[in-house]
Image (cartoon, helix red, strand yellow):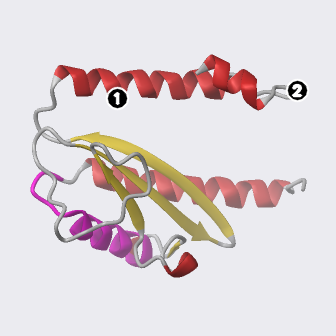
Amino acid sequence: MTKTPQEIELMAASGRLLASVFTHLDNMALEGMTTLEIDARVERFIVDVLKARPASKGQYGYGFVLNSSINQVVCHGAPSADDVLKSGDIVNLDITLEKDGFIADSSKTYLIGSVGPQARRLVRTTYEAMWKGIRAVRPGARLGDIGFAI
């Protein structure tokens, strides 16, 4: 389906709002917070400040605004009052929001406190691999081309 210039601008606006959520998180001291506390703060920011809708909450019965994947959790971990972020943790926060009918979806990995060199290398290497995969996306490319680049 081809988007109109107006629809593309609405998509971009949703993306800019989501980017501002991550800027908001960048300025939070995450160490010592539970992932459930982070979820609540992100929800307040999306709803009260951005006047948008957290798109994940309620989808397929999911009760949270974000996914929080700590350390060995590969993706889509659920926020919990028992998951307290501590120094040395790696956490990926995956967030979606909807504004004017268009959904933005992104995630960002945070290094909490003092993270060891192996963990830093893991995060750096996976980030570089992501960009190699993105650069391989082009008309005519196949999924295998992207996988090979990664």
Residue 5 found in image quarter? bottom right
The magenta span reads 30-48
Which residue is tagged 2? 140
Reply above or below: 44 against 9: below
Say left or right for 129 vs 142: left
Is residue 36 in the magenta section? Answer: yes
Labels 1 & 2 near each other (Cβ < 8 A): no
Expressed as whole percent of the image width and height from the top left, the position of residue 85 reads 16, 53
Q: Quadrant of the C terminus?
A: top right
Q: From the viewer's side, name the closer residue of 79 and 15.
A: 79
Image side of residue 135 versus residue 29, left or right = right
Examine the residues drawn in magenta and state their main secondary structure.
helix
Whether residue 66 is situated above or below residue 12 in the rendered picture: below
Residue 69 sits above or below residue 111 on the image: below
Q: Which residue is mark 1?
A: 123
Q: Which residue is located at x 57 percent, y 78 percent?
A: 60
Q: Secondary structure at mark 1?
A: helix
Q: Residue at x 61, y 58 (%)?
A: 13
Percent coordinates x, y for residue 47 in the rendering: 43, 77
Q: Within 10 Å of the Cα at label 1, are there few (<14), some (14-19), or many (20+) other Cα atoms? A: some
Depth check: give the residue in front, 19 or 125: 125
The three-letter amino acid code for the residue at tag 1 is Val
Q: Which mark is residue 40?
A: none
As drawn, 148 above or below 19:
above
